[in-house]
Amino acid sequence: MEDSTAVTDGTAARAGGGTGRVFVDKQSPQAYRALVKTSGAVGVEAAEAGLDRILIELVNLRVSQINGCAYCLKVHTEAALRGGETTLRLGVLAAWRDTEVFTTRERAALALAEATTAPADTRAREEAYAAAAGVFTEAEISAVIWVAITINAFNRVSVMSGHPVRNP
């Protein structure tokens, strides 16, 4: 799931660059460790359900796009590329509905991830769940939802902390 070393450059809980933001992962390390542990458990559930790594990374990336989390986009783009994802599919992910490059299962997972990220849209949530039920087992549906829930939490940690993304 998420990189457990989110921000390790420095020991202060405050962000650099004069932003005045608190790195909440450093300020509250016990809570952050619990989130990392949850992420690990979700990874086990996803693997046991049979979800492949690329599908998981697509979910992580789509949710991170919606939430505007630059740090998580960096981490999960790198992970997707390491896993064999193509630049074409990464490039069109934000417009996945308008392409033919994603499988039926990937499309169902992306819709379910979006519905998990914005659950107040009842119609979208019901449509996404129905599509997922047509191609996934209950264990797979649960795993996709948990992946989306977990990356949503990491997105909020990084966005609210102002975790930087720098050139290597």
Image (cartoon, rainbow, N blue to C red):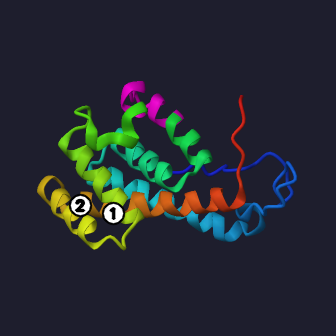
Residue 32, compared with residue 89, is above or below; it is: below
Query: Does the magenta portion include 154?
Result: no
Q: Main secondary structure of the magenta part?
A: helix
Q: CA distance from mark 2 to mark 1?
A: 7 Å
Element marked by disc 1: helix
Q: Residue 144 appears at what percent x and percent y? A: 33, 57
Residues in magenta? Answer: 78-90
Q: What amino acid is at disc 1?
A: Ala
Left or right of residue 106, residue 63 in this image: right
Residue drawn at point x = 40 percent, y = 66 percent: 118
Query: Do labels 2 and 1 touch, CB within 8 Å?
Result: yes
Left or right of residue 9, residue 73 in this image: left
Please tell me which residue lies in front, 132 or 53: 132
Please tell me which residue lies in front, 30 or 74: 74
Residue drawn at point x = 56 percent, y = 57 percent: 155
In the picture, the disc for residue 14 is: none
Q: Residue 159 appears at what percent x and percent y? A: 64, 57
